[in-house]
Amino acid sequence: MLISLEGIAGSGKTTQIKKIKKYLEKNTSKKIFISTVYEGKRRKAVSNFMNRIGINDNQIATMFLFQTLHALQYSEAKNHLNKNYIVLADRWRYSFFEYHLTNKTFTNCSIAKMLDEISFKNLHPEIIILLDIEPKIAFSRYVFREKKLKDKGLKIVDLKYLNKASEFYKKISHALHWHIVDANRDEDLVFENIKKILDKFI
């Protein structure tokens, strides 16, 4: 089973995925694999690489770098699914569309779809949960985290960007019938809602 948590930066995806992992380990017999594109050691390595070769300001170069990471995320997830793991994705293919459509990287949407298919093929999550949060709240969390990390990788986005990204996620979540959780509340209350969704499937 592939489960994806989606949402704007600062919505609490990483926090909730850790909680989900503990819950599933306790309530199922399966092993759990957390799938990420740009977190932890990988984020540090990628940020260092971006700084060394100087692509931070080049949107197209950054896009191709992250397509490489998406292809790696797909491969890792697929391998663990084949071993009967439950895979928890901290974002899946939808963040690619959100970022590049919001930033207008592509003038032709068919190019974005083609690149997405190359990286993620036909692998779609069985459960997709959107952590829906007010952009102002998310922005405060996000800026605090980024300033603490100080890795100078991807540029810090502004509140205007998060507002646009939030609208994208709301539209796609309704169109594709995702599960939507109010992430403005205390993290434990948010997790209680997530558990109710998971309990229908496990």
Image (tube, grey):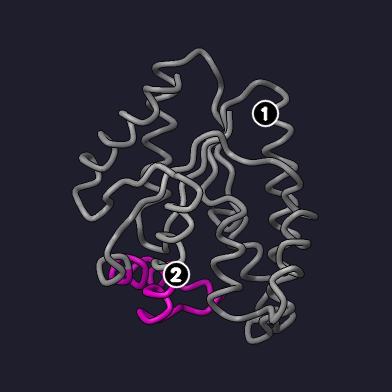
Which residue: 31% across, 46% down?
A: 181
Residue occupied by mark 2: 165
What count of labels does the image hold? Answer: 2
102 part of magenta stretch? no
Which residue is at the far front?
Answer: 175
Please, what is the three-letter code of the amino acid marked with disc 2? Ala
Which residue: 35% across, 73% down?
A: 143
Please, what is the three-letter code of the amino acid marked with disc 1? Leu
Lower sequence index among marks 2 and 1: 1
- Viewer-side label of 2, 1: 2
Q: Main secondary structure of the magenta part?
A: helix
Which residue is at the far top?
Answer: 29
Is 40 in front, or is 84?
A: 84
Asked whether disc 2 touches disc 1, contact meaning CB atoms under 8 Å apart, the reply is no
Which residue: 38% across, 82% down?
A: 160
Q: In this view, does 136 lie to the left or right of 23?
A: left
Quarter of the image with the C terminus is: top left
Is 158 in front, or is 46?
A: 158
Give percent across and percent down for residue 93. Answer: 62, 54
Residue occupied by mark 1: 81
Quarter location, residue 77: top right
Give the magenta range.
139-165
Give percent across and percent down for residue 177. Answer: 45, 45
Give percent across and percent down for residue 194. Answer: 33, 36
CA–CA distance in space, label 2 to label 1: 29 Å
Is 169 in front, or is 1?
A: 169
Q: In this view, does 67 lie above or below 199?
A: below
143 part of magenta stretch? yes
Quarter location, residue 200: top left
Which residue: 72% across, 62% down?
A: 113
